[in-house]
Structures are given as C-alpha cells and as structure tokens.
Amino acid sequence: MDDIIGNTQNTVAPSDQSKKKRPRRVVRPKPKSTQVEKSDDIEDINFTKDETVEIRASLLKWYDENQRDLPWRRISSKGEDEEDNEDTEESEKRAYAVWVSEVMLQQTRVQTVIDYFNKWMTKWPTLSHLAQASLEEVNEMWAGLGYYRRARFLLEGAKMIVEEGGGFPKAVPALRKVKGIGEYTAGAIASIAFKEVVPVVDGNVVRVIARLKAVSTNPKEAVAVKNTWKLAGQLVDLCRPGDFNQALMELGATVCTPSSPSCNECPISTKCRALLLSRCHDSVQVTDYPMKIVKAKQRSDFAAVTVVEVLEGPRMKDEAHPNSKFILVKRADKGLLAGLWEFPSVLLDGEADSVTRRDAIDHYLKSAFDLDPTKSCDIISREDVGEYVHVFTHIRLKMYVEWMVLHVKCFKKLWNKKQGEDDINWKFVDQQTLSCMGLTSGVRKKEKT
DNA sequence: AATACGGGGTC
DNA sequence: GACCCAGTATT
C-alpha cells in the first residue's frame, strides 16, 4: 500500500503529449525573466514519490504543532480512531459542523467566519434544527457575511438531506449533488468528516502548489485547474487526508501567503521550486507564483436611497424620536443581495443632481406606497444627508442618501394594512430592530441620533 | 470561458 | 485603491 498515489505519470514520456489535440505551447505570459528554466507544460508536472512522502510527513508534523484552534475543529472527535464504532449521530453532527464551516469559509477569511459559525451552531446545533429554520431567519443570521446564496443553499440542502432520510452524504459524488457544495467543499467534507482520501483545491492550495512547482501559467485556466487537482491528489495523505488537506490550506493562509510568504518558517521550503529559482536568479521572486490575473473592471451603478422615518406621535422639537419607525423594503429574491432588507431605493441611470434624484424617489414612493412627497402631506423634513460608495466585487455602487421625516397619517392605508402577509415586501421597524440587519449598514450609520 | 455574487483584511 | 480570500452556479 506503499503507493496508492494513484498515478504513474511521474514517468510519462514527453511524446505522450502528442495524443492531446489542444493547441499548446501557445504564447503564454511569463513573469519577467525568460532565461529561467520553467516547467512549462503543466500537464507534465508531477510530484515524485519521494517528494510526496516527505511533503506529507513535514506538513503533518508542522500542522500538529502549529494548527490554529478553530471552533469547527473542536467538534471533531478525538479518540474515535478505533474504526467505525462511532455512532451515527455523532458522525452526522461532525459532518454538519464541517459543512457549515466550509460553506462559510468560501471566499471568506477564517477570522470573519469564527463569530458567525459560533452563532449559527448555537442557533441550529444539528442538521434537523437547521431544516426547520426559515429563509428569513437564515438570512438574518448571515447578514454581513456576503454571498447570501450560500445561506439559502445551506437551508435547502438541510431540508433535502433530512427529507431523503439517507443520512449525511459521505462521498464526493453524493455531496456534489447538494446545492452549494462544489468540488472543493465536497472534498473538504469527505476528507475531514469522513476520512475519504480525496484532495481539495482552494485559493491557498493553488498558491502553494504553484510555488512548489514554479508553475507560471494562468492558474484559472481549465488545464491548470485540472492539473492542480491532480497534483493535490498525489500529495494527499492516505491515513490523515482531512488533516493533510487542512494543513496544506493552513500553510497557504499563514505561511505561504500571497504577498509576503515566510519561507524561512515553511516546513516544506526545501521542496519549493519557486524558492529555489528565486535564490538562483535575482529576477525571480516566490511571489511571482502563481501568475497574477487581471480582473475585469467593475461597473458603476448609482442609486437614490431614502431613509423614511415615520412618526406616530407629535413631533418633539429638536429631539430624537425614540418611537419613530423606519420603512424597510425587501429586495427581489433573485440577484444581488437577494431577499435582504434595505431602505427604499431606486437605481438611477447615472450621476444625478438633487432634483433628478428626488424625482426618482418621488415616483418610487408614489408607486410603491401611494405616498406623494410633493404634496405637503405632513412631511416634517426632507434633506440630503450625503453620498455613499459601496464596493462589491463587480459593482461600484454610489448611493445618494436622503432623509425624510413624516407623520404616520401620510399613509394611513399602509399603516393599517395587516403585517405578516406573505406577499408583503416591506415593513416598519424601530431603531432597535434596525441594528440587526447588516448590509446597507453604511447608510444606517448615518443615524446617530 | 466568462460572469454574478459580498464583505472585509491587508499592503 | 488594488488584491484576494478554506468557491459555486449560471450564462
């Protein structure tokens, strides 16, 4: 059982490439120097058996001594190495915790996830608890974490697994069937929770492997991705796949970092080709790997936002209005920030002056709330409070914010309308409630009174 | 193969 | 301000 590394490609002959049709050795951007020898056909890159053995041992040893104490690592059982006598319930609980943590960790830093994970697990300690939650609850819990689709998938997945009654999926193909579980997350759950010998490839692994092998091609390209998975599959430890995978990622997160790696602290630096090259050539740096990717420029959006503060009682002159309420509107359940609550807002065509913005807002309030701010229907005040820029991955959103204070009798019809109906996509909330909905939090900060 | 999808740390 | 993160689904 010495080498189940699963491939014999270490000795692949150069001529082997000819069987692949893909146009290859096309121009590919290289970092700076061209006189450095490169492993330039990524499909031919492999770890030798010796490298594999040493990397596994060094990395696991390093991990045993240096791993961070993270909440989802505490769930995993200690002494159940004695085979499968662990009861199903315990195993399911661990898988659930790993699942939640892995989904939260998608594109999200460990530090950010910790608090959310603890809160989540307190509220929904097991799969069946989660399966009984509502989307509304789940969204609220997720507020501020980003990529809200993840929360919805988690909920839908929990319902699905519980309904099917077959227990938690254990193998990668079964896990992949669950919405929101992709190749990475499937590998993580299978290896960490169920000890399946499968690799994982995330941003950390891409970087570590690109450096180990000094791969200078675009890591996003399909061929490169495929090869990184292959290499990760060669490395993964057969006895402790979950620990090994976490070790590789943790190395990338704490030692082999994007911009200033601590190579002197790296347990596998002697196996690192990027480091070797950087020592031989002044023109090469470890951080040249992996190749930098140019990102698409984000588009610019503009929105007019209005904070509508509603007073029930008489206005108290120059005082805070502790009993006032605010209108919140629910976004569409598809697309950006799906199903989340925000202040009434309208998308604009572009930059807009104050008049144009108010026109847009007026029109919106009229159609959505049958409220006409142009008639002086007890509007107590209305003022521009500033401009805000919120940056998403792909959008730069400029918000023009105005603040409107008006009396409840401005829209009696709405006030009297029964809340809690399903089709309702807006609500009044008080100041307290407002503090738990994240997101357009930038706007909410304005309210300091 | 490219794009949609958040938010926050870090340099 | 740019980069990038324990990615996935959709186009």
Image (cartoon, coloured by chain):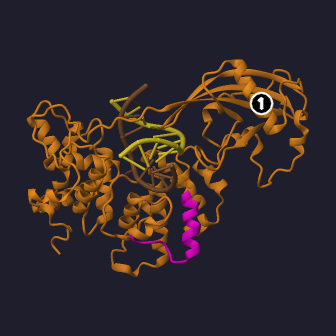
Chain colours: A orange, B yellow, C brown
Seen in the image, is A263 located left or right of residue A406?
Answer: left
Front position in the image: A145 or A84: A145
Taking the magenta stretch, the answer to whether it contains residue A304 is no
* Residue A429 vertical position relative to residue A128 in the rendered view, above or below: above
Question: Can you tell which quarter of the image residue A170 is in?
Answer: bottom left
From what the image shows, is residue A420 above or below residue A363?
Answer: below
Going by the image, does A78 lie left or right of A381? left
The magenta span reads A153-171
The image quadrant that residue A135 belongs to is: bottom right
Determine the main secondary structure of the stretch shown in magenta: helix
| Picture quadrant of residue A317 | top right
- Circle 1 packing at 10 Å, graded few (<14), some (14-19), many (20+), is some
Number of numbered discs on residues: 1
The C terminus of chain A lies in quadrant: top right
Instruction: Please state the horizontal and vertical placement of residue A377, each as a whole percent of the image.
Output: 90, 27
Position of residue A311 in the picture relative to residue A120 (left or right): right
Q: Chain of mark 1?
A: A
- In this figure, which residue is indicated by the disc labeled 1? A363
Residue at 61% x, 55% y is A138
